[in-house]
């Protein structure tokens, strides 16, 4: 129902075989990740701004930096961002879109203490760039649909439920009105207003402590705020009220994973999959935990195979399936998976690197060179852009 937070970073920003600038020509597993170079800083930072544009909030933004922490510390990012800003400010061109994204990044990261310096730098650069941006012509606005006239009941809800000057009295509201308020709380969650969402779900639960969906979505909001123990407690309440709620079990697994309790995460995901075996994302997450965290690669591959039964065109699952076979030194199977990855996403540089590694292990050296050349070509294209 909701995007898994940790999945983005384990799936998109690192590989088992490293992601250094030069494709590997020996062992696939890098002993120590290379620090980010200038091009990679900009490449990943623009991915971050894209994510923020799609709705990432504080926790997801922090986990972006955490996922790359073995290649760049927060202090490194702060220094690079200042240089990045100086370069853009020295350019006389207009950077209105970049300014907007930097200001949004600053706004969205306000709740994370460790990101306050990055937040301040982004806001300073964004404000300076915005000050000289040429305003774009506003696109025509879609004609709004006529709104229905408010009913006496809806006016009462608006005036009583959301007033800040006194506690809301919702115990007397009928079930239909309570669902209206639950939907409003859910809208706040989907809009990324997580603190507001928690407060809104608390008001719903004050009226109906047995509202299992409110407990579930309250847990999602808390997880996005980094309050993982509170999130797990909310999921537990949702499960106690509705033991067959697969999403509650799945999100509970996500929270345990983020707490570092891998076995508890897998146990929760297993229960979710008993209830909803067609959940491709939970199979994918289980595979990552089994492989990357526990080294149980054969079981991880089995989990990814199940995920692909329901989502056969997911290039990340094919990629990690190849990683699993590579970890087991089964290079033919690894190669098959990475070729499928590249069929789905031809510009996935890490898959070209790993394909070259597999071909080298298979003694197909000319093809390995071609794969490595393709990886370097993609790197060169990224530099020129």
Image (cartoon, rainbow, N blue to C red):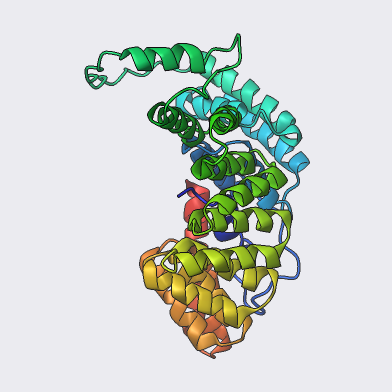
**In which quarter of the view is residue 78 placed?**
top right
Pinpoint residue 380: horizontal percent, then vertical percent: 51, 56
- Report the number of numbered marks: 0
| Closer to the camera in the image, 31 or 141 | 141
Q: Quadrant of residue 60?
A: top right
Task: Name the residue: 62% across, 77% down.
Answer: 25
Examine the rendered structure and indicate whether residue 285 appears above or below residue 200.
below
Is residue 356 visible in the rendered image? The answer is: no
Q: Nearer the viewer, residue 353 or 182?
A: 182
Q: Relative to 364, is 311 above or below?
A: above
Q: Is residue 348 left or right of residue 327?
A: left
Residue 361 x %, y %:
58, 87
Q: Residue furthest bottom?
A: 363
Q: Is residue 296 left or right of residue 373?
A: right
Q: Position of residue 204 (x, y in %)?
A: 53, 30
Q: What residue is drawn where x is 50% and y is 67%?
A: 273
Left or right: where 46 falls relative to 65? left
Q: Residue at x 50, y 51 (%)?
A: 382
Front-most of 87 and 6?
6
- In the image, residue 237 sits, relative to residue 171, either above or below, namely below
What residue is rendered at 56% in x and 88% in y? 330
The picture quadrant where one finds residue 89 is top right
Decide: is 197 above or below 327.
above
Determine the residue located farthest toward the top in the rendered image: 165
**Left or right: 178 in relation to 139:** right
Q: Position of residue 69 (x, y in %)?
A: 72, 51
Q: Nearer the viewer, residue 220 or 16?
A: 220
Asked if residue 131 shows in the view, the reply is yes
């Amino acid at each position: 129902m909701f995007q898994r937070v940790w999945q983005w970073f384990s799936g998109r920003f690192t590989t088992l075989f490293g992601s250094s600038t030069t494709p590997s020509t020996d062992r696939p597993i890098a002993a120590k990740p290379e620090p980010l170079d200038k091009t990679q800083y900009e490449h990943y930072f623009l991915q971050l701004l894209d994510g923020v544009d799609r709705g990432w909030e504080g926790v997801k933004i922090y986990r972006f930096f955490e996922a790359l922490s073995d290649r760049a510390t927060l202090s490194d990012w702060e220094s690079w961002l200042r240089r990045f800003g100086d370069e853009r400010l020295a350019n006389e061109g207009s950077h209105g879109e970049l300014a907007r994204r930097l200001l949004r990044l600053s706004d969205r990261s306000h709740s994370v203490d460790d990101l306050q310096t990055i937040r301040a730098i982004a806001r300073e650069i964004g404000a300076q760039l915005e000050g000289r941006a040429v305003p774009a012509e506003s696109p025509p606005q879609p004609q709004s649909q006529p709104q229905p006239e408010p009913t006496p009941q809806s006016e009462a809800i608006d005036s009583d439920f959301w007033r800040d000057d006194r506690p809301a009295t919702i115990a007397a509201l009928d079930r239909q009105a309570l669902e209206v308020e639950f939907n409003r709380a859910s809208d706040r969650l989907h809009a990324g207003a997580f603190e507001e969402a928690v407060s809104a779900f608390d008001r719903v639960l004050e009226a109906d402590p047995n509202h299992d969906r409110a407990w579930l979505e309250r847990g999602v909001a808390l997880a996005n705020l980094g309050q993982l123990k509170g999130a797990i407690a909310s999921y537990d309440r949702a499960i106690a009220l509705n033991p067959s709620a697969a999403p509650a079990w799945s999100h509970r697994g996500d929270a345990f994973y983020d707490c570092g309790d891998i076995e508890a995460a897998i146990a929760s995901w297993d229960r979710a999959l008993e209830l909803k075996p067609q959940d491709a994302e939970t199979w994918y997450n289980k595979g990552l935990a089994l492989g990357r965290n526990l080294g149980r690669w054969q079981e991880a591959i089995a989990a990814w195979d199940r995920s692909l039964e329901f989502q056969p065109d997911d290039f990340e699952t094919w990629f990690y399936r190849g990683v699993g076979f590579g970890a087991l030194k089964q290079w033919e199977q690894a190669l098959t998976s990475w070729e499928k990855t590249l069929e789905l996403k031809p510009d996935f540089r890490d898959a070209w690197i790993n394909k070259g590694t597999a071909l080298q292990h298979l003694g197909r050296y000319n093809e390995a060179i071609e794969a490595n050349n393709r990886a370097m070509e993609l790197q060169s294209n990224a530099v020129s852009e």
